[in-house]
Amino acid sequence: MDVEQRTARYGRIVEQLRALFAGTTDPVARMATAAAVLHAKMPGFFWTGWYLLRDGALTVGPYQGSLACLVLKAHTGVCWDALDRGASTIVPDVHAFPGHIACDSRSRSEIVVPLRDSAGAIVGVLDVDSEALARFDDADRDGLEAVAALIFA
Ligand code: SME
């Protein structure tokens, strides 16, 4: 699927989620729904889910895919990198990322985008892993940031 097709698909997913989210403002319901829709509709998504800041720890939230780590060691790995920098992180080859936390050895590339609440504070991240190398690019970053922006909208 080329960049244009992926961008168009993210656009349709955002519209679908916007309509679904009219049903509730509950962030857990919205995160679970977003994970289900993204995981089913985007090719190459091996693990799709959220990690949430709970008392300073990044703790797993709603997700789709194989069993994942429940709590991530602080300030280590890709999720913490995005959280600490306050910006999305794209990792083409997780084996080349120092400190990467391997919840499942099949993951080869990864993207993490920050999740912000309605006041703009970072409260967690949206994390997607793929079994393919270099699966994620700027089109995925833009699409996933648009999805994350809907959770507290
Ligand atoms: N690889 C992540 C940990 C979470 S799993 O990919 C589901 C990291 O390095 O933060």
Image: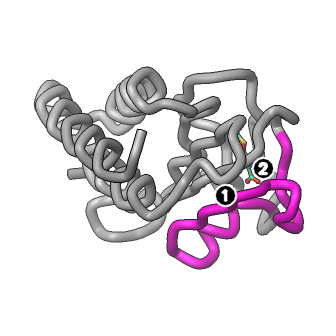
Residue at x-position 81% and y-position 32%: 106
Q: Which residues are magenta?
A: 77-102
Q: Is residue 14 above or below residue 106?
A: below
Q: Is residue 75 found left or right of 34 in the rendered image? A: right
Hey, which quadrant is residue 49 in on the image? top right
**Residue 28 in view, yes or no:** no
Is the distance from the Cβ of mark 2 to the nearest ligand 1 atom less than 8 Å?
yes
Residue 38, how many percent across, how many down? 41, 32
Q: Can residue 43 be seen in the rendering of this structure?
A: yes
Q: Is residue 143 left or right of residue 90?
A: left
**Residue at the spot of label 2:** 72
Asked if residue 89 is among those painted magenta in the image, a careful observer would answer yes
> Is residue 103 rendered to the left or right of residue 34?
right
Query: In the picture, residue 98 is in which quadrant?
Result: bottom right
Q: Quadrant of the N terminus?
A: top left
- Indicate yes or no: mark 1 CB to ligand 1 under 8 Å: yes
Judged from the image, the secondary structure of the residue bearing numbered disc 1 is: helix
The structure residue drawn at horizontal position 60% and vertical position 48%, both measured from the top left corner, is 135
Residue drawn at x 20%, y 51% as measured from the top left: 153
Residue located 39% across and 46% down the image = 2
For residue 79, the mark is 1
Under mark 2, the amino acid is Leu
> Is residue 81 a member of the stretch shown in magenta?
yes
